């Protein structure tokens, strides 16, 4: 006797991917998931009633003329979004594209030809690590933020994108009454969107999470690598700046940036100093030691290194002249990838599969065995041991590999050049 099994129910691919994304693309604690669920219960009837009272909107499937993009966090986040903005500009050449971002990111993305309008705002929960300070109702950031929301609502955007799978951002897009709202549901608040994209579990990098939104709309992805352009006068200024410090166009320049936005992501200046000293001892290189322009010169810098402290655009111009950057997981790491400068990135509490440097010529130094990664800068130990036990030897070896490759390529080029 042959027994025929009953037909199985059709699989909801997007729902399954959303559940899997909680293990592949994000890390949300059970406590936070309960909080999100409670917020959803409150928001659903409010949204239903409000949408009933709102006047009917135009056809959301029509070609968009005014597009809003939300990315108001940090420099590195903007760089990881750049491939999306590049493709968005190609796919919507005649649309007015606006970017809601942090004021500190404005010099980075301005004059790149990717967007038409920058709306700068300090979103309260993106300013601090302290949870109380993030949601302090008496913060003046809330006044600025609410005014910006009113401005966004008045602009009447046809289409908007958010890639963080964050219920707060989904709510923002609904609140400002964007006609077509594209994002993700797996972080909560999917009902606030008009389009919920299926997450790409094969490409977990945050940059690809942005690109997936365009694929959801049927738009092909033409590039996945970020590119930043510099003005000619900025490049000429960088050449003069370096020449005044004894650096010529023939020199192999190694940049070191020991800083990071979070102290938990900082490997330590003494470690960077040891790497710099070994590179100077074993290779004929010049080493630039970068530090933030609002900080005093680093006391841990080796004397042979050239100290550099510049505003963002000038920093980018000088970094563009470098052959390699050695740094923590930080904004400068991502900026280097967009300038096609190879990176040796040192990772501690964050996940390089999600936030690593983009491109093929980069090296990530990490101790992968730590089960608590990623902790998103809220280390549960007294210090970030995931960084503390990374050896100077491992970072030096990664940097030496890059230098040796460049020296071999330079020798090959010299042999191939025709004699005069």
Image (spheres, helix red, strand yellow):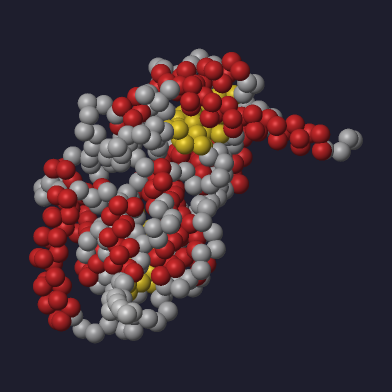
Query: In the drawing, does residue 337 fall left or right of residue 124?
Result: right
State the residue at coordinates (82%, 38%). Answer: 416
Depth check, front residue: 27 or 85: 27
Outermost front residue: 1
Outermost right residue: 420
**Residue 91 visible, this angle:** yes
When the figure is inspected, residue 238 is found, relative to residue 196, above or below; the finding is above
Q: Quadrant of residue 328?
A: top left
In which quadrant is the C terminus drawn? top right
State the residue at coordinates (15%, 72%). Answer: 47
When the figure is inspected, residue 191 is found, relative to residue 350, above or below; the finding is below
> Residue 48's x, y, as percent?
14, 76
Depth check, front residue: 237 or 415: 415
- What number of labels is visible? 0
> Residue 223's x, y, as percent?
54, 59
> Residue 204's x, y, as percent?
40, 53
> Residue 345's x, y, as percent?
46, 35
**Residue 70 visible, this angle:** no
In which quadrant is the N terminus drawn? bottom left
When the figure is inspected, residue 67 is found, relative to residue 344, above or below; the finding is below
State the residue at coordinates (13%, 55%). Answer: 34
When the figure is inspected, residue 301 is found, relative to residue 10, above or below; the finding is above
State the residue at coordinates (51%, 64%). Answer: 221
């Amino acid at each position: 006797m042959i027994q025929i099994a009953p037909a199985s129910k059709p699989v909801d691919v997007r729902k399954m991917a959303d559940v899997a994304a909680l293990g592949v693309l994000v890390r949300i604690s059970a406590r936070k998931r309960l909080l999100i669920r409670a917020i959803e219960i409150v928001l659903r009837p409010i949204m239903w009633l409000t949408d009933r009272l709102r006047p009917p909107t135009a056809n959301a499937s029509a070609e968009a003329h005014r597009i809003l993009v939300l990315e108001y966090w940090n420099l590195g986040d903007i760089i990881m979004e750049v491939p999306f903005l590049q493709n968005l500009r190609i796919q919507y050449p005649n649309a007015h594209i606006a970017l809601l971002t942090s004021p500190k990111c404005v010099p980075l993305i301005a004059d790149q030809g990717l967007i038409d309008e920058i709306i700068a705002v300090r979103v309260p929960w993106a300013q601090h690590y302290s949870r109380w300070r993030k949601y302090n109702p008496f913060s003046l950031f809330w006044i600025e933020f609410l005014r910006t929301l009113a401005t966004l609502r008045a602009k009447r955007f046809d289409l908007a994108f958010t890639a963080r799978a964050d219920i707060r951002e989904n709510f923002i897009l609904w609140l400002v009454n964007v006609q077509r709202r594209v994002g993700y549901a797996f972080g909560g608040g999917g009902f606030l969107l008009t389009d919920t994209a299926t997450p790409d579990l094969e490409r977990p990098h945050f940059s690809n999470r942005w690109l997936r939104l365009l694929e959801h709309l049927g738009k092909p992805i033409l590039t996945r690598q970020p590119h930043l352009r510099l003005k000619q006068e900025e490049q000429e200024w960088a050449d003069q700046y370096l020449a005044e410090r004894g650096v010529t166009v023939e020199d192999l320049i190694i940049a070191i940036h020991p800083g990071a936005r979070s102290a938990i992501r900082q490997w330590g200046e003494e470690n960077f100093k040891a790497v710099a000293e070994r590179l100077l001892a074993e290779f004929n290189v010049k080493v630039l030691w970068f530090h933030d322009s609002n900080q005093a010169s680093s006391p841990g810098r080796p004397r042979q290194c050239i100290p550099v402290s510049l505003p963002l655009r000038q920093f980018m111009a000088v970094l563009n002249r470098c052959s390699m950057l050695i740094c923590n997981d930080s904004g400068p790491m991502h900026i280097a990838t967009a300038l096609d400068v190879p990176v040796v990135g040192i990772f501690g509490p964050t996940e390089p599969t999600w936030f690593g440097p983009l491109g093929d010529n980069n090296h990530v130094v990490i101790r992968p065995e730590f089960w608590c990664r990623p902790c998103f800068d809220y280390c549960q130990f007294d210090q970030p041991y995931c960084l503390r036990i990374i050896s100077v030897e491992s970072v030096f070896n990664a940097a030496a590999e890059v230098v040796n490759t460049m020296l071999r390529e330079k020798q090959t080029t010299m042999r191939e050049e025709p004699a005069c």
